Image (spheres, helix red, strand yellow):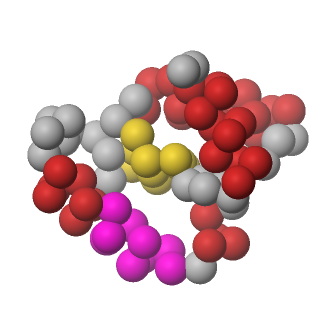
Amino acid sequence: MSAEKVLERAAASGRIVVTRNGRDFIELARAWADEGLDHAGILVVWGYRSTAFGEIVTAVERALAAHPDQDGWVNLVLAA
């Protein structure tokens, strides 16, 4: 599934995207901003192996602790 389709589906259901694919999703977030489109947030987990589940979960927990309000994630792009 393309990054755009993932972001469209996540936005439609109010879900934050957690991804290692910063290149595509950051570019896509910029394009959506230029078009005035909203998304529920993107968290890019840089530098983690795809099998480092514990480390990724910890990064997600830290990001959610720093930004606990769901509304605060709208159009937010963070790197962890």
Say which residue appears at 20% left-offset and 36% top-offset.
50
Part of the protein shown in magenta: 60-68
Q: Residue 10's x, y, as percent?
A: 64, 46
In screen coordinates, is 34 left or right of 58? Answer: right
Q: Which residue appears at 62% of the width and 73% of the height?
A: 70
Picture quadrant of residue 40: bottom right
54 or 30: nearer the viewer: 54
**Is 35 on the left or on the right of 43, as rendered?**
right
Specify whether residue 28 is painted magenta: no
Confirm whether residue 45 shows in the render: yes
Screen quadrant of the N terminus: top right
Q: Main secondary structure of the magenta part?
A: helix
Residue 49 versus residue 73 in the image, above or below: above
Figure check: 32 above or below 76? above
Name the residue at the right extreme.
36
Residue at x 68% of width, y 40% of height: 9
Q: Nearer the viewer, residue 11 or 34?
A: 11
Q: Is residue 62 magenta?
A: yes
Which residue: 32% across, 45% down? 45
